[in-house]
Image: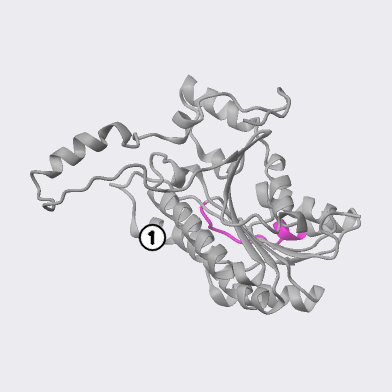
Amino acid sequence: MGNLNGKVAIVTGAGRGIGREIALLMAKEGAKVVVNDLGGGPDGAGNDIQVADQVVQEIKAAGGEAIANYDSVSELENAEKMVQQALDGFGRLDIVVNNAGILRDRMIFKMSEEEWDSVIAVHLKGSFNMTRAAAPYFKEEKRGRFINFTSTSGLIGNIGQGNYAAAKLGIFGLTNSTALDMARYNVTANAIAPFAWSRLIGTIPTETDDQKERVGKIQQMTPALIAPIVAYLATDDASDVSGQIFGVRGDEIILFSQPRPVRSAYNSEGWDVESLSQMKESFKSDFTPLEVSADVFPYDPLIGKVKVEMK
């Protein structure tokens, strides 16, 4: 008996990498899976239906049930068809995993409108589309799980990823709003920030020794390490977990903080441009530094090296 027996999941971007591992594990845990993948390249170009078909074949070969979908999540109509495909094929829907994504990295002073629009369309609009398509059904059934993918690129920062960072931070906002809107209907929504080697990460340059060392560390963090928490958040045991951001870095699970006030300043006479200099000096020690993900996580990934430690 699997932890997801009798449940039906849609996993977007499930043909390769993290999405593939999620689809395989959910099927192993007993879920029936709609495997969605356009079959495009890291930049979203191209279309290869064999990518989704191969995952479906692998699930069936292991005794599971799955069907393929080849549509782009960037269109609401496609998302609605995907939800209907799950209902027609398996009779119900319980889980939506919004994993599909592309990269079009560029420094902000060089980024084109097309590079911005295409990344926002797949990540942020795609996550909305799938949420909007499934939410009415979840509301009616009074159950459901949304599991979305954010990134430390948005939560913390990375260079040359203005489009990706904006989309990924937007996805957290969408996740939080979905969790609030759907709480009364027993529907949860959570976000995952994954650290894992994938085709998208494979675009990182390896020209210098530092770059090679960085990529070597990332390659240790395989996509399979991300799948367990996604599957867990889809279980009945996680029915009281919603609106949270989890990071997965090797064998380490991270719970991220969320924006909340850290200091305040009051002026009974009101503020003007000159007096705000006092506010700056008061707040300065609590300013968030300009950092990238590697600054916040400077240590090597913990993979099979340490016992579980709660802190």
Q: Nearer the viewer, residue 9 or 191?
A: 191
Q: Based on the picture, tell me whether residue 50 belongs to the magenta stretch.
A: yes
Q: Quadrant of residue 139?
A: bottom right
The residue at the far left in this view is 274
Q: Which residue is mark 1?
A: 114
Q: Is residue 300 visible?
A: yes
Quadrant containing the N terminus is bottom right
x, y percentage for residue 309?
68, 28
Three-letter residue code for mark 1:
Glu
- Membership of 80 in magenta stretch: no
Helix, strand or loop for the magenta stretch, by majority: loop
At x 46% / y 45%, what residue is drawn?
155
At label 1, counting other C-alpha atoms closer than 10 Å, the crowd grade (few under 14, some 14-19, many 20 or more) is few
Q: Is residue 254 above or below residue 35?
A: above
Left or right: where does residue 246 sit relative to residue 103?
right
Residue 180 pos. (x, y %): 54, 65
- Residue 143 point in image, percent of width and height: 70, 70
Residue extent of the magenta highlight: 43-53
**Regarding mark 1 in the picture, which secondary structure is present there?**
helix
Q: Quadrant of the C terminus?
A: top right
**Camera sees residue 54:** no
Furthest toward the top, the residue is 209
User: Vertical placement of 194 versus 86: above or below?
Assistant: above
The quadrant holding residue 213 is top right
Q: Is residue 83 left or right of residue 7?
A: left
Which residue is depicted at the point 14% across and 39% down?
Answer: 277
In the rendering, at what x and y percent does residue 184 appear? Answer: 61, 71
How many numbered marks are there? 1
Residue drawn at x 48%, y 52% as measured from the top left: 168
